[in-house]
Image: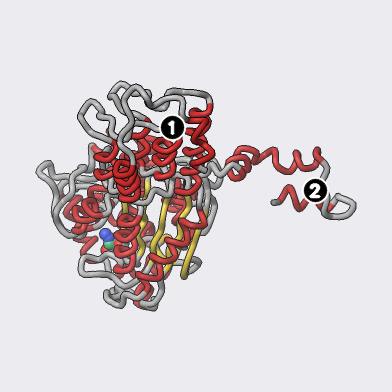
Amino acid sequence: MDNLKETLQNVEDGLTLDREQFKKCVQSNIVLLTQAFRKKFVIPDFQSFTSHIDELYESAKGLSEGKVADYIPQLAKFSPDLWAVSLCTVDGQRHTVGDSKVPFCLQSCVKPLKYAVAVNDYGTEYVHSFIGKEPSGLRFNKLFLNEDDKPHNPMVNAGAIVCTSLIKVKAVQHLFYVMNFLKKLAGNEYVSFSNATFQSERESGDRNFAIGYYLKEKKCFPEGTDMTSILDFYFQLCSIEVTCESASVMAATLANGGICPITGERVLSPEAVRNTLSLMHSCGMYDFSGQFAFHVGLPAKSGVAGGILLVVPNVMGIMCWSPPLDKLGNSVRGIQFCTDLVELFNFHNYDNLRHFAKKYDPRREGGDQRTIKCTLCVCRLALSSVDMEQRDYDSRTALHVAAAEGHTEVVRFLLEACRANPAPKDRWGNTPMDEAAHFGHHNVVGVLQRYQDICSPPAADNHQGGAEKNLDTFF
Ligand code: DON
């Protein structure tokens, strides 16, 4: 857009570009633009996808349960009605709904991010010589260590405080350093600092001081660590502010393996991203982590300000924000949104196993477009006199595949125009009808049933050569 504006200023009528000028405008973004015009983005039908997102947002908006955290005035001030969802795909497609420009503190959502910074800078081995990788099964702020006297993981306070000490020991201007890192994760979008929150966190942080002294007693910090200054740094990191929009880009950078989809810059190593997502998956949602992994099946991290940072690996990052929290400390509307999202789309880690019930997959082309393409492809093959009853290694025919995938038009074409045998058996003895029934494609079952009722199945040696003759009838 910048190129375009600049070039148009020098164009006589202010509107028309010649070929060279056009080329100059698009060449630095040619890959992105080509992907856009060819509908090759990870979510090809983005408009339809985002209209579903808006519906899920609206449905969660009606919830009135939960309580806004009130242990410090900077959190208590938030209206319980605030509610926002922002998303950014790995191709940089953006969508946002609700109060997505209101700044709020990351609080515990910063835990996975600082862990990622630590692993990025110092490697897995060093970081995990101080911190475990196991869910604790206890509340996030418990005074408790594992059998080796280490914090259970970096997502609970004890682990996050030790993680903070690893960054502080090595970086000189540590707060500036981490904020700068977060800014890069967010594609240079909104990242700020609330000094008032920091002061309040420090004043009300007795439990964290207790954890700090316990960690010191058990020699959990690197040598020479000044525990009280580490706690200050911990409280400062909790007080870093984002908006729903900027945080969605942070999540998208994790979804994209550490490369920010907005700037194209590699911000985190693949190792740091993989570790972070693994621990978010198993430990990111307080005492609800197991249930969240079971029902939603995606890496996420929540914070006491009401944020939930959600990652759909290789697809998108999402930030949900709404201050009212449930008993376990997770945003009520955020949890509802994440659960509904995965009920509708096949984003759960184990949604895509073979022979699994199908959910809506926004990564694919829309149903209509796919059907047209498939039908045209099959027509083309039939017109080239290809044997439409050829079998693959598993003895499956085109009709098996079309029936299993629910392509009603292709099934009709194979039966009516190509006179394909309607009941061939594959090597497991399954017919196209079995496939259609198994995958719940009731239209296809109906077509196959009607065809079998009307026509007696053609003899095995009499199926070919009818394609051209019957094409007209079919259409
Ligand atoms: O450490 C605390 O108590 C808070 N400032 C952190 C808040 C939070 O989000 C809870 N996290 N696990």
Q: Nearer the viewer, residue 387 or 158?
A: 387
Q: Is residue 162 visible?
A: no
- Comes first in the chain, label 1 or label 2: 2
Q: Nearer the viewer, residue 145 or 100?
A: 100
Q: Position of residue 463 (x, y in %)?
A: 38, 27
Mark 2 highlights which residue? Answer: 7
Q: Position of residue 246 (x, y in %)?
A: 49, 57
Label 2 SS: helix
- How crowded pointer 2 is (Cα within 10 Å; few <14, some 14-19, many 20+) is rated as some
Q: Nearer the viewer, mark 1 or mark 2?
A: 1
The amino acid type found where label 2 is placed reads: Thr
- How crowded pointer 1 is (Cα within 10 Å; few <14, some 14-19, many 20+) is rated as many
Q: Is residue 80 above or below residue 306?
A: below
Label 1 SS: loop
User: So how many labels did they put on this image?
Assistant: 2
Mark 1 highlights which residue? Answer: 418
Q: Position of residue 77 (x, y in %)?
A: 38, 78
User: Residue shown at 24%/40% (left/top)?
Assistant: 434
Q: Is residue 188 left or right of residue 155?
A: right
